[in-house]
C-alpha cells in the first residue's frame, strides 16, 4: 500500500482537490490530528503518497517556519503535481475553515461575543485531546518503529515540549544531524540549503489602507518566523494583537483562539477571525493570506531539493531524526493542550472515551465524535459552572 511512485500518480488533481476540501471541512483536532489523518488517508488507505514522500514532507514542515499541517498539505500536493498540486492542496485545505471563521467573525461582531462557545469548547476541547492522542500514537509507532536512537529522540522532544510548552526549532535540526552522524559517520563537506520566501505583496481590498498594511506586515511575520504547530503561534499573536497593537482585548483574543479550536482545519486560521474583528472582511483576507503565503512559498522552493536528494542515505538519516523529533514534539503538545482542555472529571472522561472509541472502532469518523462532544458540552457546561 505504501509503494506510490512520485512520477506515476494514482489520483487526479481533481481527486486531490476534493480530498483536501473534505479534510479542511471535517478535519478536527489541530495539527497533531491533521498530519495523522493525511498519513492514514493518503499513505495507508489510498496509497497515493509513498511513506518516504510523507516523511520528507513532515520533516520539511517541521524545520521550516509556518503552520505545520498546511505545509505538509502543500508538500504532498507538490509530490506528483508540482506547483499546481501544491497550490490546489494548500488552497483547498485552508479555504473551508477560512470561510467558517469569517462567518463566526460576522456573528461575533453582529451579536456581541460568543458565550455559547465556552460550552461547546468544554466538550469539543476534551474530545479533541482523545483524537490527538490516538493520532500521536499512530504516528509514533509508524515513524519511530523499533529504532532505539529514534525513541530516545522522541522521548527527549516530548519532554522538552511538555516542560517548555513550546516547540524549539533547532532541536529538530539537531536530532536530524545526530542520526546522520550516528548512521553515516560522515566526513566534512556535506551541506543542506533551505531558502526563505519573499514577503507577499499587499493588494487593495477596500478599507483603511494603513490598517491593512499593518495587518499584512504583522501576520507575514507570524507566518514566516514562527516555527511549530498552531500552539506555537498563539503567544506571538497575543504579543502583537493585544499587547503591541491593541487591536483586541484579552477576552476577544481568547474567543479567537476558541474559534480556531472548535473549527476544522489548521489552528492558525484563527488569524482570519482576528483579521475580521480588526478590519472586517478585507482584514480577514489580508491576515489569513499573509499567514499562509510565506509557508507556501518556502515549501514550494524547498520541495524540489527534498525530492532530488531525498533518496540519499545521508538525507534519509537526517529526515528520520527530524521526523522522530517532530513526532515527539507532537506527542508532547498533546499533554500541553490536555492541561488546558481537561479541567474536571467530565472532560477527562470525555477525552478517555473518545480515545477508546477511536481505538476500538477504526472506521469511526471523527466529525461524529466532535458533534457529539459539542452537544455534551452544551448540556454539561451549565451544570458544572453554575452550581
Image: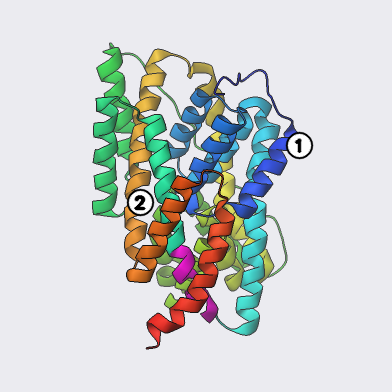
Q: Report the predominant secondary structure element of the magenta stretch.
A: helix
Q: What x and y, as percent, mark residue 348?
A: 35, 64
In the shown orientation, is residue 110 left or right of residue 52?
A: right
Q: Which mark is residue 333?
A: 2
Q: Is residue 23 above or below residue 348?
A: above
Q: What x and y, as percent, mark residue 153?
A: 27, 34
| Res. 90 in view | yes
- Decide which of tag 2 and tag 1 comes sooner along the chain: 1
Q: Is residue 17 above or below residue 235?
A: above
Q: What x and y, as percent, mark residue 81?
A: 68, 28
Judged from the image, the secondary structure of the residue bearing numbered disc 2 is helix
**To which quarter of the image does residue 213 belong?**
bottom right
Q: Which mark is residue 70?
A: none
Residue depicted at 60% across the width and 47% down the height: 200
Residue 281 belongs to magenta span: no
Q: What x and y, as percent, mark residue 196?
A: 49, 37
Judged from the image, the secondary structure of the residue bearing numbered disc 1 is helix
The residues bearing labels 2 and 1 have C-alpha atoms spaced at a distance of 34 Å
Q: Is residue 246 above or below residue 369?
A: below
Viewer-proximal residue among 177 and 111: 111
- Disc 2, disc 1: CB below 8 Å? no
Please identify the quadrant where the N terminus is shown.
top right
The residue under label 1 is 14
In the shown orientation, is residue 316 left or right of residue 287?
A: left
Q: For mark 2, does the 10 Å Cα neighbourhood hold few (<14), some (14 to 19), or many (20 or more) residues?
A: many
What is the magenta range? 114-125
Viewer-proximal residue among 380 and 51: 380
| Colour mapping used in the image | rainbow
Residue depicted at 62% across the width and 28% down the height: 48
Amino acid at each position: 500500500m505504501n509503494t506510490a511512485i512520485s512520477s506515476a500518480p494514482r489520483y487526479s488533481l481533481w481527486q486531490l482537490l476534493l480530498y483536501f476540501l473534505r479534510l479542511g471541512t471535517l478535519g478536527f483536532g489541530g495539527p497533531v490530528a491533521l498530519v495523522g489523518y493525511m498519513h492514514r488517508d493518503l499513505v495507508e488507505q489510498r496509497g497515493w503518497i509513498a511513506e518516504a514522500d510523507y516523511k520528507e514532507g513532515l520533516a520539511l514542515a517541521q524545520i521550516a517556519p509556518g503552520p505545520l499541517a498546511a505545509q505538509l498539505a502543500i508538500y504532498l500536493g507538490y509530490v506528483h503535481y508540482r506547483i499546481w498540486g501544491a497550490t490546489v492542496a494548500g488552497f483547498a485545505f485552508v479555504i473551508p475553515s477560512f470561510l467558517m471563521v469569517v462567518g463566526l467573525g460576522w456573528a461575533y461582531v453582529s451579536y456581541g461575543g460568543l458565550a455559547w462557545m465556552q460550552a461547546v469548547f468544554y466538550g469539543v476541547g476534551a474530545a479533541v485531546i482523545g483524537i490527538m492522542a490516538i493520532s500521536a500514537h499512530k504516528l509514533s509507532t509508524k515513524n519511530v518503529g523499533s529504532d532505539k536512537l529514534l525513541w530516545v529522540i522522541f522521548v527527549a522532544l516530548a519532554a522538552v515540549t511538555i516542560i517548555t510548552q513550546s516547540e524549539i526549532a533547532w532541536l529538530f535540526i539537531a536530532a536530524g544531524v545526530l542520526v546522520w552522524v550516528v548512521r553515516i559517520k560522515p566526513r566534512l563537506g556535506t551541506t543542506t540549503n533551505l531558502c526563505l520566501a519573499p514577503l507577499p505583496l499587499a493588494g487593495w481590498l477596500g478599507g483603511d489602507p494603513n490598517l491593512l498594511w499593518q495587518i499584512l506586515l504583522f501576520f507575514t511575520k507570524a507566518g514566516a518566523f514562527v516555527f511549530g504547530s498552531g500552539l506555537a503561534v498563539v503567544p506571538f499573536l497575543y504579543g502583537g494583537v493585544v499587547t503591541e497593537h491593541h487591536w483586541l482585548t484579552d477576552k476577544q483574543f481568547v474567543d479567537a483562539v476558541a474559534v480556531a479550536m472548535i473549527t476544522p482545519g489548521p489552528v492558525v486560521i484563527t488569524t482570519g477571525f482576528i483579521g475580521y474583528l480588526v478590519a472586517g472582511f478585507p482584514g480577514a483576507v489580508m491576515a489569513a493570506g499573509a499567514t499562509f503565503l510565506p509557508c507556501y512559498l518556502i515549501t514550494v522552493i524547498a520541495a524540489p531539493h527534498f525530492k532530488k536528494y531525498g533518496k540519499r542515505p545521508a538525507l534519509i538519516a537526517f529526515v528520520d531524526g527530524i521526523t522522530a523529533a517532530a513526532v515527539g514534539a507532537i506527542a508532547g503538545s498533546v499533554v500541553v493542550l490536555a492541561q488546558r482542555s481537561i479541567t474536571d472529571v467530565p472532560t477527562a472522561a470525555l477525552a478517555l472515551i473518545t480515545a477508546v472509541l477511536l481505538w476500538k472502532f477504526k472506521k469511526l469518523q471523527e466529525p461524529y465524535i466532535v458533534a457529539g462532544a459539542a452537544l455534551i458540552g452544551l448540556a454539561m457546561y451549565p451544570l458544572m459552572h453554575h452550581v
